[in-house]
Image (spheres, grey):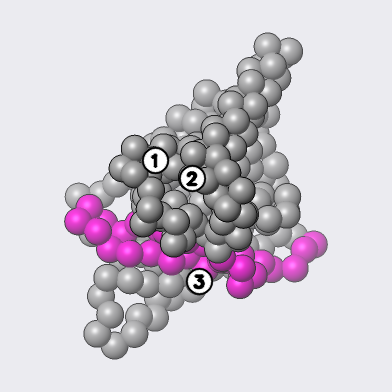
Amino acid sequence: MTALKKMIMGMSLCCAVGAARAEVIAPDALIRNTVQEVITIVKEDKDIRAGDQKKILALVDAKVLPHFDFQRMTQLAVGKHWRTATPEQKQALVTEFRNMLVRTYTRVFTVYRDQTVEVKPLKMGAGVTDEATIKTIINKPGSQPIPVDYEMKKSDDGWKAFDISIEGVSMVMSYRGTFTSQIEQGGIDGLIKTLADKNANAAEGELRKADAK
């Protein structure tokens, strides 16, 4: 996945979801109602745009993480090898994959520059009530619009996203190829170690940056 697509994916994830509500809100309405709230917070908070990790993670925890099905995302990314993983390995994979995605899309807050998100009206197939594809367009002055689609499924506590496609390319499927190669080379434990090492190195880099300020 290119750096540009990672940035777009990050902004998409962060803008896609909002605070939990008592009632179940339609998936397109959930995205539409929340985009402006999240963008407003980012625009008005100079610390977030400057890369304040504490504030960024607090915003992510409040607005993003509860509304993504990380287990299903991880299962889809790992593919056929998920069936052979032990419960402990599955939990470790979910944890490390989640941490990797969190770091990917928290960085987008520091590069936000007047992007807007247009949410298309929801069109669900006949008889389909628990899955939906939400189509959006990310617009930035002077740049081509970028289509971003969200695959969402209705759960007991509302709609949750389990994949994002940017210009027709699935985020989950993009990771699957890499994960498959890593599993074939070092097994599931090898993939877990690779993800854990990347997350640890990223965390160490963030600490160095924070100490340097």
Question: Would you say the residues marked 2 and 3 are in contact, meaning their CB atoms lie under 8 Å apart?
Answer: no
- Which residue is drawn at the image coordinates 63% and 38% (left, top)? 107
In the figure, is residue 183 to the left or right of 50? left
In which image quadrant can residue 45 be found? Answer: top right
- At a point 33% along the width and 64% down the height, the residue shown is 153
Q: Quadrant of the N terminus?
A: bottom right
How far apart, in angstroms, are the residues tagged by discs 1 and 2? 7 Å
Asked whether residue 181 is drawn in magenta, I would say no
Contact? badges 1 and 2 (CB < 8 Å): yes
Which residue is the site of mark 2?
A: 188
Provide the residue designation for mark 1.
89
Q: Is residue 154 above or below residue 38?
A: below
Which dot, 3 or 1, sits closer to the camera? Answer: 1
Residue that sits furthest to the bottom in the current view:
126
Q: Is residue 154 magenta?
A: yes
Query: Between 138 and 13, which is closer to the camera in this rendering?
Result: 13
Name the foreground residue: 75 vs 6. Answer: 75
Amino acid type, mark 1: Gln
Q: Where does the C terminus fall, quadrant-wise?
A: top right
Q: Residue at x 61, y 48 (%)?
A: 185
Residue under label 3: 135
Q: Position of residue 134 (x, y in %)?
A: 45, 70
Q: For label 2, count other residues whose C-alpha is less than 10 Å away and answer few (under 14), some (14-19) or many (20+).
A: many
The amino acid type found where label 2 is placed reads Ile
Bounds of the magenta segment: 142-171
Q: Earlier in the sequence, mark 3 or mark 1?
A: 1
Main SS of residues in magenta: strand
